């Protein structure tokens, strides 16, 4: 069984139905130049590895799918493949679609910032849409999200199984670590997005308390 990722141009879809429609419309079309370049790089890197270490379930990837690329991988290579696709696709203006999770990760309007999603791993950027979607969807077994801007500078949230969110941020040192509890996922997402954008009023109006270690 494989885990699939699909590359498609940024901005061509904003919902799963639109993604499916775009993918269907591209079937049978010649590869675009950018997709051919990405496929070639993936196939080359995969072929350079020992058989037991390869990261593609289908070799080679690519073919007549227009401006899209299907990339199936073994489950133990999900994180590696996703990061590789971000490296290759984002600079070329392509989004990464995860059909298993129903996530369209589109770089339009993104911030290049380190993100750790407890249920899905690491991501190299954040968008406003992803922030709201990910916060609202946090669920067991690892219902947390961390956004890092640098050494000792991060904001993180954990969703309690009963519903409330613990939200904390650290501003450079342990003594500058504050937290609060909120129940509205939209409020949590708004604060995280404002913080990621380095807005000085991020979290204004919230009762923060210093977190002791």
Image (cartoon, grey):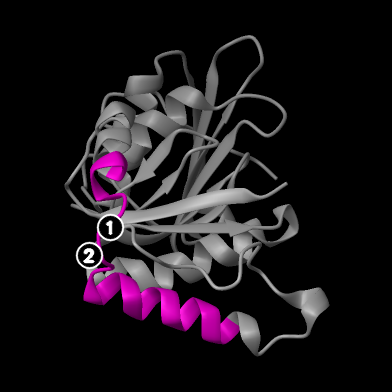
Task: Specify whether residue 26 is painted magenta.
Answer: yes
Q: Nearer the viewer, residue 145 or 74?
A: 74
Looking at this view, name the residue that lies furthest to the front: 28
Task: Specify whether residue 159 is painted magenta.
Answer: no
Residue sitting at x 52%, y 35%: 101
Establish if 207 lies above or below 144: above
Number of residues whose C-alpha sits closer than 10 Å to that of mark 2, classed few (under 14), some (14–19) or many (20 or more):
some
Residue sitting at x 67%, y 50%: 2
Q: Which residue is mark 1?
A: 111
Q: How many marks?
A: 2
Q: Nearer the viewer, residue 14 or 131?
A: 14
Q: Which residue is mark 2?
A: 93
User: In the picture, which quadrant includes the C terminus?
Assistant: top right
Res 205 quadrant in image: top left
Q: Nearer the viewer, residue 62 or 108?
A: 62
SS under mark 1:
strand
> Residue 79: x percent and y percent?
62, 59
Establish if 102 lies above or below 199: above
> Residue 72: x percent and y percent?
58, 56
The stretch of residues the image draws in magenta is 23-45
Number of residues whose C-alpha sits closer than 10 Å to that of mark 1, classed few (under 14), some (14–19) or many (20 or more):
some
Is residue 124 visible to us here? no
Q: Is residue 188 left or right of residue 52?
A: left
> Residue 7: x percent and y percent?
37, 57
Q: Nearer the viewer, residue 123 or 97?
A: 97
Residue sitting at x 62%, y 80%: 46
Label 2 vs 1, first from the N-terminus: 2
Establish if 165 lies above or below 67: above
Which disc number belongs to residue 147? none
């Amino acid at each position: 069984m494989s885990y699939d990722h699909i590359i498609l141009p940024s901005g061509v879809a904003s919902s799963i139905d639109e993604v499916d429609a775009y993918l269907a419309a591209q079937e049978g079309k010649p590869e675009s130049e950018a997709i051919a370049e990405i496929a070639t790089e993936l196939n080359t890197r995969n072929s350079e590895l020992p058989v037991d270490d390869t990261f593609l379930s289908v070799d080679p990837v690519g073919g007549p799918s227009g401006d899209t690329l299907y990339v199936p991988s073994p489950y133990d290579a999900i994180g590696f493949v996703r990061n590789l696709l971000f490296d290759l696709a984002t600079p070329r203006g392509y989004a990464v679609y995860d059909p298993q999770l129903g996530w369209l990760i589109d770089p339009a309007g993104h911030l290049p910032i380190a993100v750790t999603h407890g249920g899905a791993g690491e991501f190299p950027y954040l968008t406003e849409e992803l922030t709201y979607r990910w916060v609202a969807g946090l669920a067991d077994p690892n219902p947390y999200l961390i956004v890092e801007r640098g050494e000792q500078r991060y904001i993180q949230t954990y969703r309690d199984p009963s519903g409330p969110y613990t939200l904390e941020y650290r501003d450079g040192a342990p003594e500058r670590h504050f937290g609060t509890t909120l129940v509205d996922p939209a409020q949590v997402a708004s604060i995280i997005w404002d913080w990621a954008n380095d807005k000085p009023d991020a979290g204004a109006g919230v009762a923060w308390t210093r977190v002791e270690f």
